[in-house]
Amino acid sequence: MNNTLKKLLLSISCTLLFFTGQAQNSRSPLEDMVNAIKNDRVLDMVKYFDNFVPITLNNNQAIYSRNQAEVVLHDFFEKNTPRDFNTMENGSPDNNSKFMIGTFDSQNAKFNVYVLMKMKDGNYIIQDLRINKE
């Protein structure tokens, strides 16, 4: 009986771990981006970077390599730590793209955010990221 109870508990634990993992992975790419911005987690954004990433910061537009984009965003968020983030609008203009418009407040200023993601090789990547001071 003791052995049967152990097997049952092990089976239940594995099932719970599986469903917990699935729930965490069920967030959409846009939800990941919102959480990454809200929580100052540039590393969570990097998984949506292509080899080159178009980023506009305070109306300065540039295309960065994957590594450069990470450094640029890390530097930006270090100077403008988000305190709050609000999604204003989001949607899917077609089956292969998603967008999000929002605002975030930092201690220094308020910023408008626009993210456009497109499907590439079965994964969403950032096609355009704009963060501009209001």
Image (cartoon, rainbow, N blue to C red):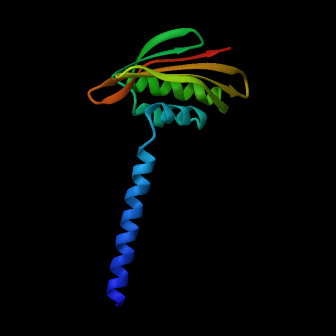
Q: Quadrant of the C terminus?
A: top right
Residue at horizontal 38 percent and vertical 25 percent from the top: 125
Query: Relative to residue 21, is residue 115 drawn left or right?
Result: right
* 15 vs 7: above or below: above
Count the marks. Answer: 0
Tell me residue 130's x, y (percent).
53, 16
* 12 vs 7: above or below: above
Of 6 and 78, the residue lying toward us: 6
Tell me residue 111's x, y (percent).
65, 20
Of 129 and 100, the residue lying toward us: 100
Residue at horizontal 55 percent and vertical 37 percent from the top: 35
The residue sitting at the left extreme is 121
Q: Quadrant of the N terminus?
A: bottom left
Tell me residue 129's x, y (percent).
49, 19
Tell me residue 108's x, y (percent).
73, 24
Residue at horizontal 52 percent and vertical 24 percent from the top: 90
Query: Relative to residue 17, is residue 34 drawn left or right?
Result: right
Of 120 and 43, the residue lying toward us: 120
* 60 vs 69: above or below: above
The residue sitting at the bottom extreme is 1
Query: Relative to residue 116, is residue 77 drawn left or right?
Result: right
Quadrant position of residue 121: top left
